[in-house]
C-alpha cells in the first residue's frame, strides 16, 4: 500500500508543477489534462512496481515498465516520440511537426519532472543541451522549441 502512496504523491506533485508551467504559457487545459493516462492501470501499476516495488530489476517488472512507457508516449502528444515514425524508404525514424500547444506542454513536462524529483535548480537550457541530439524532431518543431527555451525570436 505504501508504494502506491509514494507513487501517487510523486505523480500529483509532478502534475502540479506541470500545471503551473503550462499556466505560465497560457496552456491551462494542457496543464489540467497532463499525464492523465498515468492513472490507467496499464501505466500506473508497472510504474509503481518499477519505482517502488520489491524487485525493480526483475525481468517481468522491467518488461511491464517498458510497455507502460511505450503506451504512455503513444497516448500523450506532449512527448516528441508521439510524432515520430519509421520511414522504410528513408530507412530512418522521421518526425512530424508538433503543434505549438504540445511543444509548450513538453517544455512544461520537462521542468515539472525536474521539480518533482527535487531538481528545481536545473536550468532547462543546460538540460536541453545535454539531450537535444537524442531528440528526433521536425525542423520547424526544433526551431519553435529552441526559440521558447532560449527566448529568441
Image: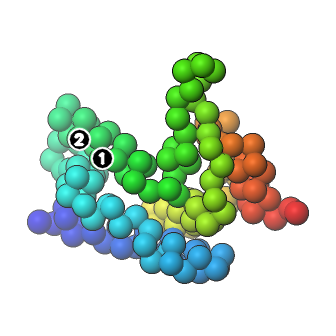
Judged from this view, the residue extending furthest toward the front is: 89
Q: Is residue 125 visible?
A: no
Q: Secondary structure at mark 1?
A: helix
Rendered-image quadrant of the C terminus: bottom right
Residue depicted at x 66% and y 75%: 25
Q: Seen in the image, is 38 located left or right of residue 111?
A: left
Whether the residues at callouts 1 and 2 have beta carbons within 8 Å, the answer is: yes
Residue depicted at x 32% and y 61%: 38
**Viewer-side residue, 3 vs 137:** 137
How many dots with numbers? 2
**Viewer-side residue, 151 vs 73:** 73
**Viewer-side residue, 18 vs 116:** 18
**10 Å neighbourhood of mark 1: few (<14), some, or many (≥20)?**
many
Q: Is residue 99 visible?
A: yes
Residue depicted at x 26% and y 47%: 50
Q: Please state the horizontal and vertical placement of residue 107, each as a whole percent of the image.
A: 61, 61
Q: Please state the horizontal and vertical placement of residue 48, each as a whole percent of the image.
A: 23, 55
Question: For mark 2, what is the residue?
Answer: 64
Q: Seen in the image, is 19 located left or right of residue 66?
A: right
The tag on residue 115 is none
Question: For mark 1, what is the residue?
Answer: 68
Q: Quadrant of residue 131?
A: top right
Q: Quadrant of residue 105?
A: bottom right
Amino acid at each position: 500500500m505504501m508504494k502506491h502512496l509514494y507513487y501517487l504523491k510523486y505523480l500529483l506533485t509532478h502534475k502540479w508543477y506541470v500545471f503551473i508551467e503550462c499556466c505560465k504559457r497560457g496552456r491551462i487545459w494542457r496543464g489540467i489534462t497532463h499525464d492523465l493516462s498515468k492513472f490507467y492501470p496499464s501505466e500506473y501499476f508497472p510504474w509503481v512496481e518499477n519505482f517502488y516495488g520489491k524487485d525493480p530489476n526483475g525481468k517481468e517488472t522491467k518488461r511491464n515498465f517498458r510497455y507502460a512507457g511505450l503506451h504512455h508516449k503513444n497516448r500523450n502528444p506532449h512527448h516528441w516520440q508521439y510524432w515520430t515514425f519509421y520511414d522504410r524508404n528513408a530507412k530512418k525514424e522521421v518526425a512530424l511537426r508538433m503543434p505549438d500547444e504540445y511543444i509548450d506542454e513538453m517544455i512544461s513536462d520537462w521542468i515539472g519532472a525536474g521539480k518533482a524529483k527535487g531538481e528545481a535548480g536545473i536550468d532547462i537550457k543546460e538540460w536541453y543541451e545535454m539531450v537535444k541530439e537524442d531528440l528526433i524532431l521536425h525542423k520547424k518543431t526544433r526551431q519553435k522549441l529552441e526559440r521558447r527555451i532560449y527566448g529568441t525570436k
